[in-house]
Image (spheres, rainbow, N blue to C red):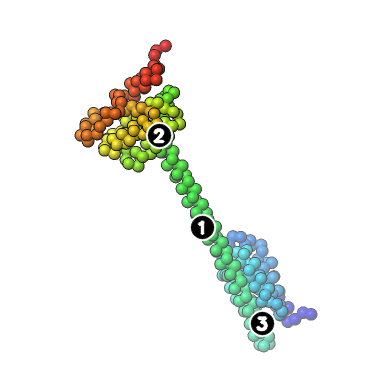
Amino acid sequence: METPHDQLREPFEQAIKAALSSKALSNRGTLASFKLPGIAASLSKILVDADGGLAKAAQLGGELGRQGMSLESVLAAQQAAVEQAAKIDPVTDRVVLVRHVLDGFASLIGALLKEEQAEIDRQRTQMEQAFFSTVDTQRQAEDALRSAIRELSTPIMPVSEGILVLPLVGSIDSHRAGEINERLLEGIAEHQAEIVIIDITGVPLMDTSTANLLLMTTKAANLLGSQIILCGIGAEIAQTITHLGVDLSNLTTMSNLQSSISYALEQTGLAIKPL
């Protein structure tokens, strides 16, 4: 049987649809405008339902929150519905209906805000995960780049069976000195090198730490059965070594890389000859 409230369903629906359409731009992009008439119809049906209206309003509010409806749109719909309810007579029915409309929207808004907060939390979690994933990816890329730079800055080049060349370029601090020593010993073990030529032509300055590196590397290489040949010592570095009082007497020194390679080949019973 149709009640006086049922007669208000169509006016409610039209008023709510107009209100929702006027605030459509405030909704999230996930809520398509073509859904608004259906939402208005569902909402108007709930508002004139005397039984179970609050529970249905809460359910609808949760759905609207997930779909992306804004609080601004819901408040506009509430105002339109209250204005529509305020037009009926007698006054007794008017008061009851306005209270019913307000209670329904209160339940709807509560559920919508709860779902909206849940969506905000989900988005925050996704953003945090994306951020940490990006940071982790960037860290991995930096580690890979750092490793590549380290390998390029300390290249171990086999020039003949049992002979390695290690050209050094740029300044050498204590950290890099340790890396050079580590990579050189790995190269000796990997290639079973008998002779290692260290070319310091590209090293502009030599301090105590660099000189100590050469001594440490020589001792470590000797323990692995390799001989160190040092070449590329310039006049300034020679003066520095003398001034520092560093004893390089245990090192075989040559003037340049070419003579060093020739010497190393002779030590292994080989030589470079013209065809």
Callout 1 environment at 10 Å: few (<14), some (14 to 19), or many (20+)?
A: few
Screen quadrant of the N terminus: bottom right
Give the structural element (helix, strand or loop) at label 3.
helix
Disc 2: which residue: 185
Disc 3: which residue: 97
Give the structural element (helix, strand or loop) at label 1.
helix
- Depth check: give the residue in front, 150 or 230: 230
Residue type, label 1:
Glu
Image disc number at residue 128: 1
Q: Earlier in the sequence, mark 2 or mark 3?
A: 3
Give the structural element (helix, strand or loop) at label 2.
helix
Residue 34 drawn above or below residue 178: below
Residue type, label 3:
Leu
Q: Residue at x 34, y 20 (%)?
A: 263
Quarter assignment of residue 108: bottom right
Residue 256 drawn above or below residue 182: above
Q: What x and y, as percent, mark residue 184?
A: 39, 33
Callout 2 environment at 10 Å: few (<14), some (14 to 19), or many (20+)?
A: some
Residue type, label 2:
Leu
